[in-house]
Amino acid sequence: MFQRQTTEEYWQPLDGIWQKTLVHGASTLMVEFRLQRGAILPLHSHPHEQTGYLVSGRIRLTIAGESRELEPGDSWCIPGDAAHGAEIMEDSVAIEVFSPVREEYLPERRTP
Protein backbone atom coordinates (compact mmCIF):
# COMPACT_ATOMS: atom_id res chain seq x y z
CA MET A 1 0.00 0.00 0.00
CA PHE A 2 1.27 3.47 -0.89
CA GLN A 3 -0.05 6.82 0.30
CA ARG A 4 0.83 10.22 -1.12
CA GLN A 5 1.16 13.22 1.19
CA THR A 6 -1.83 15.58 1.19
CA THR A 7 -3.00 18.36 3.47
CA GLU A 8 -6.50 16.87 3.56
CA GLU A 9 -7.96 14.51 6.13
CA TYR A 10 -6.47 16.08 9.29
CA TRP A 11 -8.92 16.09 12.17
CA GLN A 12 -8.74 17.73 15.58
CA PRO A 13 -9.41 15.39 18.51
CA LEU A 14 -8.32 18.01 21.12
CA ASP A 15 -7.59 21.74 21.18
CA GLY A 16 -4.22 22.34 19.51
CA ILE A 17 -3.82 18.74 18.30
CA TRP A 18 -4.47 17.62 14.71
CA GLN A 19 -3.91 14.15 13.40
CA LYS A 20 -4.01 12.23 10.17
CA THR A 21 -3.72 8.51 9.55
CA LEU A 22 -0.96 8.15 6.98
CA VAL A 23 -1.11 4.43 6.21
CA HIS A 24 -2.06 1.15 7.86
CA GLY A 25 -1.61 -2.56 7.37
CA ALA A 26 -2.93 -5.69 9.04
CA SER A 27 -1.17 -5.05 12.38
CA THR A 28 0.20 -1.48 12.38
CA LEU A 29 -1.14 2.03 11.79
CA MET A 30 0.95 5.20 11.26
CA VAL A 31 -0.30 8.66 12.27
CA GLU A 32 1.09 12.17 11.81
CA PHE A 33 0.34 14.54 14.69
CA ARG A 34 0.58 18.32 14.31
CA LEU A 35 0.81 19.81 17.77
CA GLN A 36 0.37 23.46 18.73
CA ARG A 37 2.46 25.10 21.43
CA GLY A 38 0.58 25.09 24.74
CA ALA A 39 -1.64 22.12 23.88
CA ILE A 40 -2.03 19.38 26.48
CA LEU A 41 -2.60 15.71 25.78
CA PRO A 42 -4.11 14.50 29.08
CA LEU A 43 -2.89 11.30 30.70
CA HIS A 44 -4.66 8.32 29.13
CA SER A 45 -4.03 4.70 28.23
CA HIS A 46 -5.08 2.18 25.60
CA PRO A 47 -4.13 -1.42 24.85
CA HIS A 48 -2.07 -0.50 21.77
CA GLU A 49 1.73 -0.34 21.82
CA GLN A 50 2.78 3.06 20.49
CA THR A 51 6.16 4.06 19.08
CA GLY A 52 6.96 7.60 18.04
CA TYR A 53 9.49 9.96 16.49
CA LEU A 54 9.60 13.73 16.96
CA VAL A 55 10.13 15.33 13.56
CA SER A 56 10.15 18.95 14.74
CA GLY A 57 9.44 21.09 17.80
CA ARG A 58 9.71 20.23 21.48
CA ILE A 59 7.38 18.29 23.79
CA ARG A 60 7.40 16.98 27.35
CA LEU A 61 6.19 13.37 27.24
CA THR A 62 5.19 11.40 30.33
CA ILE A 63 5.08 7.59 30.17
CA ALA A 64 4.12 5.56 33.25
CA GLY A 65 5.06 8.42 35.58
CA GLU A 66 8.42 9.26 33.94
CA SER A 67 8.69 12.59 32.08
CA ARG A 68 11.23 13.58 29.44
CA GLU A 69 11.69 16.69 27.34
CA LEU A 70 12.04 15.59 23.71
CA GLU A 71 13.61 17.37 20.74
CA PRO A 72 13.69 16.60 16.99
CA GLY A 73 15.17 13.19 16.32
CA ASP A 74 14.13 11.73 19.70
CA SER A 75 11.90 8.66 19.78
CA TRP A 76 9.88 6.66 22.31
CA CYS A 77 7.96 3.46 22.91
CA ILE A 78 4.82 3.35 25.04
CA PRO A 79 3.78 -0.14 26.15
CA GLY A 80 0.13 -1.09 25.83
CA ASP A 81 -1.99 0.05 28.80
CA ALA A 82 0.72 2.44 30.10
CA ALA A 83 -0.61 5.84 31.20
CA HIS A 84 0.89 8.60 29.05
CA GLY A 85 0.34 12.25 28.14
CA ALA A 86 2.19 15.25 26.75
CA GLU A 87 2.71 18.97 27.08
CA ILE A 88 3.50 20.71 23.79
CA MET A 89 6.30 23.21 24.41
CA GLU A 90 6.76 24.37 20.78
CA ASP A 91 4.77 23.82 17.61
CA SER A 92 5.69 20.22 16.79
CA VAL A 93 5.21 17.35 14.37
CA ALA A 94 5.36 13.73 15.56
CA ILE A 95 4.95 10.45 13.71
CA GLU A 96 3.57 7.52 15.71
CA VAL A 97 2.90 3.87 14.94
CA PHE A 98 0.26 1.85 16.79
CA SER A 99 0.02 -1.92 17.08
CA PRO A 100 -2.44 -3.47 16.77
CA VAL A 101 -4.30 -1.12 14.43
CA ARG A 102 -6.40 1.47 16.24
CA GLU A 103 -9.70 0.85 14.52
CA GLU A 104 -11.06 4.26 15.56
CA TYR A 105 -8.20 5.91 13.60
CA LEU A 106 -9.09 4.24 10.31
CA PRO A 107 -10.35 7.01 8.00
CA GLU A 108 -13.46 5.04 7.06
CA ARG A 109 -14.37 4.46 10.73
CA ARG A 110 -13.36 7.76 12.29
CA THR A 111 -16.07 10.13 13.44
CA PRO A 112 -14.96 13.78 13.62
Image: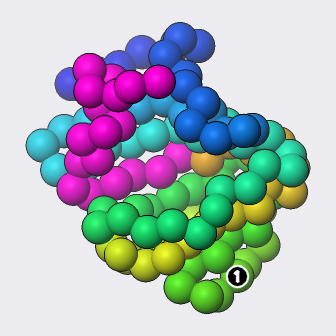
Q: Residue at x 86, y 57 (%)?
A: 89
Residue 64 to residue 47: above or below: below
> Can the viewer see residue 57?
no
Residue at the bottom extreme of this rendering: 65
User: Label 1 belongs to which residue?
Assistant: 67
Determine the image quadrant of residue 29. top left
Quadrant (top left/top right/bottom left/bottom right) for the N terminus: top left
> Can the viewer see residue 61?
yes
Q: Seen in the image, is 69 located left or right of residue 22? A: right
Residue at the front extreme of this rendering: 111
Amino acid type, label 1? Ser
Q: Seen in the image, is 58 located left or right of residue 48? A: right
Please provide percent x and percent y for residue 81.
35, 75
Q: Residue at x 78, y 49 (%)?
A: 39
Residue 70 to residue 35: above or below: below
Residue 108 is inside the magenta segment: yes
What scheme was used to colour the molecule? rainbow
Residue at the left extreme of this rendering: 26
Residue 49 is inside the magenta segment: no
Give the magenta part as a residue range. 95-112
Q: Residue at x 38, y 42 (%)?
A: 30
